[in-house]
Amino acid sequence: MIRVAVSGAAGRMGETVCRAVDAAEDMELVGRADPRLGTSVEEAIANADVMVDFTTPAVAADNARTALERGVHVVMGTTGADFESVARSGGANLFVAPNFAIGAVLMMEFARLAAPHMRECEIVELHHEAKLDAPSGTAKRTAELVRAAGGNVHEPIHSVRLPGLVAHQEVIFGGLGQTLSIRHDTTSREAFMPGVLLAIRRVGELPERYVVGLERLLFG
């Protein structure tokens, strides 16, 4: 049984993660950290094996450091902070994913495959109005993968923040006489839960202490 604490448990993503962990037969929800609940990260992780974080960029790195220093593995869903230096804290593992939706990971993989053949690329990402970072972690990760594969991502990445949206991204490639659009749409936060649960199950056996990207778990 994997004992899980959730940081940011009173937020929309945090509440969804708590329900998913509660429903998983091989997991036990042992802590919920959130200022709105009056529970600190230190209190929430006291009996945890893994902490999942969906908070804000301002506090996520400190939350991760606190958990790692106490030997608790971290599954990080918050983007917009520097986690590479934090990963050296303590002896536990830190897994960071810009996006936990499997469809979004496939979108990024398809974009990487397209980049050498259709080099000019624009990225448009759309999220709900409460998302703090722009461009999103998914958009920045997509740009990294496209550039590494030889593509040219036009700047700036286009970010849209509006009520009614959840998480959406379109990668548009242009070539001589043709375009290619690769799009992923998230219609509910449940789309992220299979990826979150996979990360919880695998974070303790990562080949390195710091791993970025759900594709590392899906494709090896």
Image (cartoon, grey):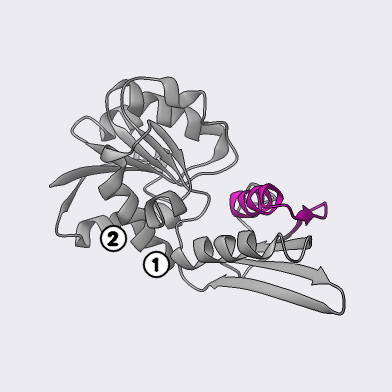
| The quadrant where residue 203 appears | top left
Q: Is residue 10 above or below residue 182?
A: above
User: Are dots 2 and 1 in contact, CB under 8 Å?
Assistant: yes
Q: Dot 2, crowdedness within 10 Å: few (<14), some or many (≥20)?
A: some
Position of residue 29 in the picture relative to residue 99 (left or right) = left
Position of residue 125 in the picture relative to residue 92 (left or right) = right
Q: Which residue shows up at 55% across the image and 61% down it?
A: 109
**Residue 22 magenta:** no
Front one among 206 and 197: 206
Q: Is residue 158 above or below residue 181?
A: above
Position of residue 138 in the picture relative to residue 188 (left or right) = right
Report which residue position mark 1 lands on: 190
Report which residue position mark 2 lands on: 20
Task: Report the magenta residues as a range.
Answer: 137-158
Residue extending furthest toward the bottom: 177
Q: Which residue shows up at 66% across the image and 64% down it?
A: 126
Front one among 57 and 174: 174
Q: Position of residue 188 (x, y in %)?
A: 46, 70
Q: Position of residue 14 (x, y in %)?
A: 39, 52
Task: Please tell me whether mark 1 sits on a helix, a strand or a loop.
Answer: helix
**Residue 138 magenta:** yes
